[in-house]
Each structure stands twice: as C-alpha cells, then as structure tokens.
Image (cartoon, grey):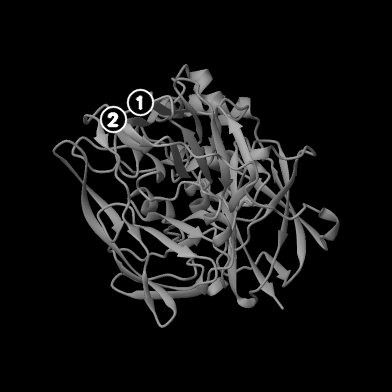
C-alpha cells in the first residue's frame, strides 16, 4: 500500500509524530541543555601508517571512551584510537595497505572503507564482522584516484547506533598527479577535514540515541552540531587559500552549506576525487555519506562563517519543516578566522584532471533499483522494517540480489517511489552520473561518485564498470545512506563473478 506525502503528513500529526519532528528539525548552533564557548576546531590526528616490508600498515583500535563536548560534561562515546572518531588515514595510490582492526567496544562491529575499490571480502561490510575482543585484518592495493574517502562501522542493524557514538574517520588518498597541482596539502594548516554530525544529548551528557518509530522512519536528527567532534568551533587560518575536505557523517541530516557573508568558493572534488575543473559556488548541498573538497579564499582578511540550513528542495523533510512552522534547521558549522600573517593565496588551476567521457553505449546491461518506504498501515503502527526495501525486498543477508560480470559496464537506474529523498551508496565502485530525469548532472556531480542523492519521485542513471575483483561468495552492498533506513532494510547486495 502506497501513501501520498500529504496523507503521510496528516498521519504524522494524527500519531503525534509532528511534535517530535518539530524538535528534531529545529536546529540550533548548540544544545539547549548544555553550553560551551567557542572552541578551537579539533583536527583528527594524521596517521600515515607504518611501512613494513613494502606494505603500509595501520593499527586501528575500536574502543570506548569519555568525551567532553561541553564544559565540564562527560559523554560516553566510541572512537578509533581515541575517545571519539578516528585518525585521518593517509595513503597513496599504488600502495598495498594493511588494516589491523581490534574491536573493544563491547558490541560486535565491522569497519567499512567507504569509497574504496577493493576485494569484497576486505570491504568491511556486514559480512566481515568482528566480535568484541577480537581482531580482523584487511589488506588491499589502493587502486583509484586521489580522493577524500572515509571509514565507519557497517554492522547490520547497528550501523546507525555505532556511527552515532563515534565509529568513523576520514581517509585521504594521494597520487602524484593531484599533488603536482599546487593545491593546499599541509594537513591541519591549509588542508583540513570537516566531519559534520548533528547529535542530541541527555541532561546527564549521554548521547540521546533512542530511535522510536518516527526516527526509524525519517532518520535521527540532532539539535547540536559536532564538527570533528567539536561544538561551536573556530579555526585560525594561516593561509589565504584554505582547502576543506567536507564529509557529511550524519545519520540522516542533509546540509545546504554557504557562508554568512555570501562569499563564493570553489569545489574541486567530489566523492571519488578531483573534478575536471573548479566549480564556483555560493552554496552546496551534501547528503549523508557524500564528500566534497572546497577551496576558500580568505585574502580579504575577514572572518568567514560557514553555516548550513536544511535544503529547500521539494522533499518530505522540507514539507515537515514548513507545515510545522519549524526553523530552517540552521547550524553554524565553522568560524574561520584569518591570521594577521598568512601564506599568499594559490593560483587555482583551471584544469584539475581529465576524466573518461560518459558513454552509455558501452553498457551491456541496465538494472533498475526502486527505493521504497512502503508507508502502509504497518509503518503507521511502527513496523518500519516491514516497509524499507529496494525493488520490494528488504535486506536479507542470505540472499544475493544481483550478480554482475567482471569487466562489464552497466547502467544502474535508481528510482525513488517513496515520499522522501534518499542518498544511494554503492560499495566498491566509483560511478559516473549519466542523467537526472533525463537531464545532465550539474558540474558538481560530473565527477566520480559513490553516493548520489535521489529526491522523491525522481530517478538517476549511473554508469558503472566492475573491474579487478571477482568473488562469487563475498558480496558488496548497495543501500540508502540514511543509516536508520539502511538498518531497517533499505539495502541489497551483489556479487561480481568472472
């Protein structure tokens, strides 16, 4: 049984969800429960790994910890080699890397290398679980372009909970071509990651993650912005050109990012690496799981405040906000304070890289994937998991949904028949967008992607090539990257076979 957006909203009001939605979408800069003054932005430590016999090895301990997001308030958290989040892993194209992962969080978990092209049994998805007190090792060659990727828990049914509590981190992949462009690359100085996460807290400081039917249906939203785990952050910039590596690491929130003074900036990369040329923007929308690299010009010496609001697109979330009279979900993300003495601005290259032409005629097969939330009576009664599906089937760990031939090129046609937008992520491959409802992608989406936003009622066609790795027994995942939707069943799996 399908239900219209209008009737869904009426149902929300009738079931009392409307009041909860109001609280979730009414974003503020800091929590209304706890407070803190401006804090220096935390920069995750950079981990280059250790070279051992030609292999770059990383030791990653998933652990419990205690974080202080607010003044004199302790919060129990998860982290990787620390109390909250993990180090930024830096690696180079052509290297073999080895990930030594230990799990000490008290839960079975996994660690997925989001955006990496790698063998399926090294992917760190829900089939590569790590029991508490146990270890797991992944080893693979870095076979892709320079890019900003990330890693996070991918435990079936617990991904949202574990990521919410801190199991995530950034990966920087470098190559010679990208390094030769003269872009800012002094980590922590003129090249910084920004992990965006909205969170809620209990009065005693604990994370407030107790998703009921409404959060499982819409995703879990917070009233407090964490940026690299920092509340109300500022950054002292020592260069007139600042490179920001943005990651939407939130469970469900979409961000429409812009500067309060209206200044423009340039996007130079998307999920899978550099765009062909810089794209000048005044705002940028990122859905969960997406990344973007920006160059900010600070040569005017003025403070630049990056903020976000809920995107104003015609989607369900925006309708909830408008109907309930809520705020626009505005958050202060980061206050950038230029130092008095700064390195001069770079001359931004007009050409960044050359990408393959998107030629759909080389595809040997088209597959269609429909994202559906059902929204029948069962969901209204709280049985969310009975409705979240792709092509009418919820996730089944024992069922392989698709089988793909090695070295084949395919078109994946993603449609969205639900009442809400969904970010769609595919493991292993960096794809290209052919079109959105028949129209070419925008310049910001014309590069390599692994996560793509599919608005309600729309469809997107993707071009994918499956290379290097075949394993009939180990599947890759594809799923909505709203983590509650993923946990509730909006996920499938495919194998690549020779």
Place of residue 35 in the rendered image (x, y in percent of width and height, measured from the top left): 21, 29
Name the spot of residue 215 as percent of width and height, x first. Answer: 44, 39
List the residue tagged with mark 1. 28
Q: Is residue 227 left or right of residue 177?
A: left
Nearer the observer, 253 or 3: 253
Which quadrant would residue 397 be assigned to in this image? bottom right
Dot 2: element: loop
Dot 1: element? loop
Q: Which residue lies most toward the top here?
A: 325
Nearer to the camera, 219 or 234: 234
Query: The C terminus appears in which quarter of the rendering?
Result: bottom right
**Residue 357 percent across, percent down from the top left:** 77, 53
Task: Give the residue drawn at x 60%, y 43%.
Answer: 349
Horizontal arrangement in the rendering, residue 258 relative to residue 37 (left or right):
right
| Quarter-of-image position of residue 372 | top right
Crowding around mark 2 (Cα neighbors within 10 Å: few <14, some 14 to 19, many 20+) is: some
Identity of the residue drawn at 70% across and 53% down: 355
Label 1 CA crowd tier, 10 Å (few <14, some 14–19, many 20+):
some
Q: Do the CB atoms of the residues marked 2 and 1 lie less than 8 Å apart?
A: yes
Please indicate, yes or no, whether residue 225 appears anywhere in the rendered image. no
314, above or below 357, in the image: above
> Do we see residue 93 in this rendering?
yes
Q: Is residue 76 left or right of residue 7?
A: left
Q: Give the residue at mark 2.
A: 31
Q: Residue furthest left?
A: 72
């Amino acid at each position: 049984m399908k239900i219209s957006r209008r009737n869904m909203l009426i149902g929300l009001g009738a079931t009392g969800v409307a009041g909860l939605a109001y609280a979730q979408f009414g974003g503020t800069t800091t929590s209304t429960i706890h407070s803190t003054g401006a804090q220096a932005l935390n920069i995750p430590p950079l981990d280059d790994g250790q070279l051992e016999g030609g292999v770059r090895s990383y030791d990653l301990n998933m652990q419990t910890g205690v974080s202080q997001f607010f003044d004199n308030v302790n919060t129990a958290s998860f982290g990787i080699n620390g109390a909250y989040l993990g180090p930024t892993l830096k690696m180079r194209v052509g290297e073999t890397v080895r990930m030594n992962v230990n799990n000490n969080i008290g839960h079975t978990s996994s660690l997925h290398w989001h955006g990496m092209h790698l063998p399926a049994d090294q992917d760190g998805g829900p089939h590569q679980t790590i029991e508490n007190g146990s270890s797991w090792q992944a080893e693979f060659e870095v076979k892709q372009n320079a890019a900003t990727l990330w890693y996070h828990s991918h435990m079936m049914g617990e991904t949202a909970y574990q990521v919410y509590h801190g199991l995530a981190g950034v990966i920087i992949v470098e190559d010679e071509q990208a390094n030769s462009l003269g872009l800012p690359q002094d980590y922590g100085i003129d090249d910084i990651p920004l992990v965006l996460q909205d969170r809620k807290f209990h009065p005693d400081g604990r994370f407030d993650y107790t998703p009921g039917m409404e959060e499982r249906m819409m995703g879990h939203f917070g009233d407090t912005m964490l940026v690299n785990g920092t509340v109300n952050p500022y950054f002292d910039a020592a260069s007139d050109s600042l490179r920001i590596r943005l990651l939407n690491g939130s469970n469900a929130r979409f961000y429409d990012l812009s500067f309060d003074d209206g200044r423009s900036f340039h996007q130079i990369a998307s999920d899978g690496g550099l765009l062909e040329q810089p794209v000048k923007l005044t705002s940028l929308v990122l859905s969960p799981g997406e990344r973007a690299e920006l160059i900010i010009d600070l040569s005017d010496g003025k403070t630049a405040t990056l903020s976000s609001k809920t995107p104003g697109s015609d989607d369900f979330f925006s309708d909830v906000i408008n109907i309930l009279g809520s705020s626009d979900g505005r958050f202060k993300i980061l206050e950038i304070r230029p130092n008095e003495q700064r390195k001069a601005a770079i001359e931004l290259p007009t050409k960044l890289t050359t990408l393959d032409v998107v030629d759909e005629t080389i595809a040997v097969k088209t597959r269609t994937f429909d994202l559906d939330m059902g929204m029948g009576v069962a969901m209204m009664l709280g049985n969310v998991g009975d409705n979240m599906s792709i092509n009418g089937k919820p996730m089944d760990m024992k069922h392989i949904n698709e089988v793909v031939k090695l070295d084949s090129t395919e078109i994946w046609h993603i449609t969205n028949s639900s009442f809400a937008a969904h970010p769609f992520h595919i493991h292993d491959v960096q794809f290209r967008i052919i079109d959105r409802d028949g129209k070419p992608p925008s310049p910001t989406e014309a590069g390599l992607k692994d996560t793509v936003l599919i608005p309600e009622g729309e469809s997107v066609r993707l071009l994918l090539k499956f290379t290097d790795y075949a394993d009939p027994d180990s599947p890759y995942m594809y799923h909505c990257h709203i983590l509650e939707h993923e946990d509730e069943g909006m996920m499938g799996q495919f194998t690549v076979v020779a």
